[in-house]
Image: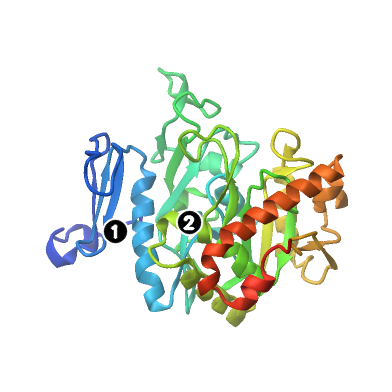
Amino acid sequence: MLIVPTKEELERDFSGDQVDYHIINAGEHPNCPHYEGTGTKTSVALNFSEKKLTILGSQYAGEMKKGVFSVMNYLMPKKGILSMHASANEGKNGDVTVLFGLSGTGKTTLSADPHRRLIGDDEHCWSDTGISNIEGGCYAKCIGLSEEKEPELFHAIKYGTILENVDFLDEHQHDVDYNSSRITENTRASYPLNYIDGAKIPAVGGHATNIFFLTCDAYGVLPPVSKLDYDQAMYHYISGYTAKVAGTEVGITEPENTFSACFGAAFLPLHPTVYAELLAAKMKKHGTKAWLINTGWSGGKYGVGKRMNLKTTRAIIDAIHSGSLDNVKTHPSPLFNLGIPDTVPGVQTDILDPEKTWSNKEEFKKTLTKLAASFVENFHKFEDKTPKSVVQNGGPKL
């Protein structure tokens, strides 16, 4: 989860000023809910002045990585470096793609591309020299995992990988049942980056050529792919829209729409516009293109339509990487004014326009309007610190 320390670093005296941050993970030991600022037996507390992270009442290992990520989100922008809740990979020609997205949007799956080298699957920084991973490995969801669907991830699980919350087909043989959610939907595999075939070591690359904002739209009204201008890129980055799916949080059994600023609001000590302005500046400086990718529902909302086929999403991403969509004609989507490509190689044309996949057109319009209204309402809290052009041109028009 973290960058592997050198031999010299391990031999240091872990006390006093030599330590960057202490992580005190008490696992099962409960927090006292009467402590100020807490109300449950689970507490994850980060103290920037004392440089300590304390975890109580949680055996979820991800609290450690996200705690360190929160530290990076505080320190890096002060140096003009953008910290990102995103995965990244690199093509044969050195082109780098950054994939933003919350849990359940396909960030880990889509970044593990057999045709590209993986830089990392979750947390990165964008500095004046390019993109760099701030972790030493991956922490992947493995519910429903199979060799056929996700071969790169499947083969990364080998001796040395840590499995969390998994169940077994046979308790004596320890054959993992990846389809079991008996313990939780949130089963995980933590493995070093070099366990992924073709991973880039050291995990650094150049400046981003393409940025993908991955969203799992449970309403089923956003296009599977759309091209964003700079104002739209900032708007959707600040919005951070997706649907929480089963396994991302306790109590979530059906998709639930949510907005998480910069696709990681819980880990941002600074105002979201700080990160958004850094992103926009770097995109303009390096000519980076931005795309909104819907990995959610098509042909209707959750319960009516179907989840977007992974092969379709991969074909879209392959087309972007090949440059096939750089100059393709686009048409605006209703209300959101997103640039929908007229054609994408290897993808059925009808799928590209969500309205065409719905049998009930009136229901589509009502659902689209409902989603657009939620975007507008959510963005009100950011308007005072967001550039006017982004407020006026970046989002949907009701």
Front-most of 263 and 112? 263
Looking at the image, residue 160 sits to the left or right of residue 344; the answer is left
235 relative to 241, above or below: below
Residue 27 placement (x, y as % from top left):
27, 38
Question: Would residue 356 be visible to someone looking at this image?
Answer: yes
Placement of 233 over or under 363, stated as above or below: below
| Badge 2 or badge 1: first in the primary sequence | 1
Q: Which residue is mark 2?
A: 264
Q: Please state which of the two labelled residues, at mark 2 or mark 1, is closer to the viewer.
A: 2
The percent position of residue 397, horizontal first and vertical second, equals 73, 64
- Residue 98 in sight here: no
Q: Nearer the viewer, residue 209 or 62?
A: 62
Q: Secondary structure at mark 2?
A: loop
Amino acid bearing label 2: Gly
Residue 54, how many percent across, how many down?
A: 25, 49
Residue positioned 41% across, 40% down in the render: 161
Q: What residue is at 60 percent from the left and 41 percent from the top?
A: 151
Side (left or right) of 33 relative to 280:
left
Label 1 neighbour load within 10 Å: few <14, some 14-19, many 20+: few
Residue 255 lies, in percent from the top left, at 60, 39
Residue that sits furthest to the bottom in the current view: 285
Quarter the C terminus occupies: bottom right
Query: Quadrant location of residue 291?
Result: bottom right
Q: What residue sits right under mark 1 in the picture? A: 5
